[in-house]
């Protein structure tokens, strides 16, 4: 089976699953005697996923550069949401302009150029040193440390971490040439299936809250059920990866754990800012960062584990 055939088969499988999910959720909605927030939420999520899967599929089919541009736009919108909820001052505007209009293009341009050595350190070193220096030149020291820490943190999670997803396309894995888009799809699939199963298992079986103040919807039962399901799916999808089934299960477990921690950490950030969602860009899903919160922690770890052990 060629890499393209594998990709089309996986996309077709996801479309089939979405079709089944659409049928089930619409049936539940119509049979419900009273309005149900849970069912309405599931319906909205499935409908939103149709749009997102269409965008992902188009980018993958169009190739590496289209995928890189798609994730660069995702970083742009995620950073915009982060900055919108994070108080800034006029003295920070130059730093923010640099982050948006230089940081994002250069970071993703380095991926397109396959320049790993600079891609890996550009934002954590040069970006993190430049932005506070530019803010200092503006001459406003009030809450200087807190303001710049917020900008740096936003740049880290919204740009640096997310950029590791398309960076998977640059890995040169022996015996896996031309199939890196499948590796990217594997990461996103495991992350999103874990999120969905954690939500469903939490609603059906959840009794013990994991972090009731930070994220009231996260439960022990939801985490265990979601993790078990996502690891099983990850192991079953080993045929599209350079991993053995056991290695794929291990990678999926790492993705699930890091995704959970990412979602929890960003929920804590939202709570500290008094917000329920990062935005309302995607109906039923909140903002871009609400959809990428699990990815931001999982992507860099998955990228570097794959690069270290398989290239």
Image: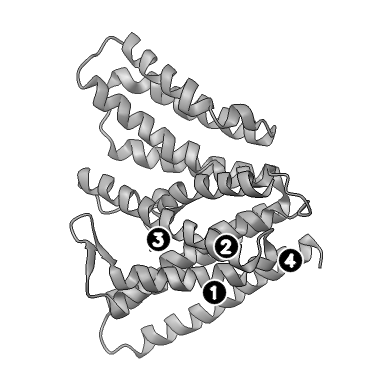
Mark pair 2, 1: CA separation: 9 Å
* Of the two numbered discs 3 and 1 in the rendering, the one whose residue sits closer to the viewer: 1
Is the C terminus in the top left, top right, bottom left or bottom right quadrant? top right
Label 4: which secondary element: helix
Q: Is residue 41 visible?
A: no
Mark pair 4, 1: CA separation: 18 Å
> Disc 3 marks which residue?
283
Q: Is residue 174 above or below residue 195?
A: above
Is the N terminus in the top left, top right, bottom left or bottom right quadrant? bottom right
* Residue 126 in the figure: left or right of residue 217: right
Q: Which mark is residue 18?
A: 1
Of labels 3 and 1, earlier in sequence is 1
Of labels 3 and 2, earlier in sequence is 2
Of labels 4 and 1, earlier in sequence is 4
Query: Residue placed at 62% from the left, 28% from the top?
Result: 117
Mark pair 3, 2: CA separation: 14 Å
> Disc 2 marks which residue?
53
> Disc 4 marks which residue?
6
Q: Is residue 8 visible?
A: yes
* Residue 167 in the figure: left or right of residue 178: left
Of labels 4 and 2, earlier in sequence is 4
Q: Quadrant of residue 166?
A: top right
């Amino acid at each position: 089976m060629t890499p393209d055939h594998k990709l089309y088969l996986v996309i077709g499988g996801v479309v089939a699953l979405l079709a089944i999910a659409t049928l089930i959720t619409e049936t539940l909605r119509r049979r419900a005697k009273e309005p149900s927030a849970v069912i309405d939420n599931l319906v909205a999520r499935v409908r939103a996923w149709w749009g997102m899967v269409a965008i992902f599929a188009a980018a993958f089919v169009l190739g590496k550069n289209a995928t890189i541009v798609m994730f660069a736009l995702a970083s742009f919108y995620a950073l915009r949401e982060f900055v919108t909820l994070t108080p800034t001052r006029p003295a920070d505007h130059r730093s923010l302009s640099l982050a948006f209009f230089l940081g994002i293009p250069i970071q993703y341009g380095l991926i397109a150029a396959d320049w790993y050595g600079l891609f890996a350190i550009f934002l954590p070193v040069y970006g993190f040193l430049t932005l506070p220096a530019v803010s200092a030149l503006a001459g406003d020291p009030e809450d200087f440390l807190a303001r710049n820490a917020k900008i740096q943190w936003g740049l880290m999670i919204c740009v640096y971490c997310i950029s590791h997803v398309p960076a998977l396309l640059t890995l040169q894995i022996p015996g896996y040439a031309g199939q890196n888009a499948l590796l990217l799809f594997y990461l996103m699939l495991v992350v999103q299936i874990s999120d969905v199963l954690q939500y469903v298992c939490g609603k059906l079986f959840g009794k013990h809250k994991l972090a009731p103040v930070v994220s009231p919807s996260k439960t022990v039962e939801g985490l265990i059920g979601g993790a078990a399901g996502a690891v099983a799916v990850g192991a079953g999808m080993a045929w599209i990866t350079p991993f053995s089934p056991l290695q794929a299960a291990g990678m999926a477990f790492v993705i699930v754990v890091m995704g959970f921690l990412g979602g929890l950490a960003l929920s804590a950030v939202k709570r500290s800012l008094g917000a329920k969602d990062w935005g309302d860009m995607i109906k039923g899903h909140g903002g871009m960062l609400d959809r990428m919160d699990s990815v931001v922690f999982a992507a860099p770890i998955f990228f570097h584990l794959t690069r270290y052990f398989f290239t």
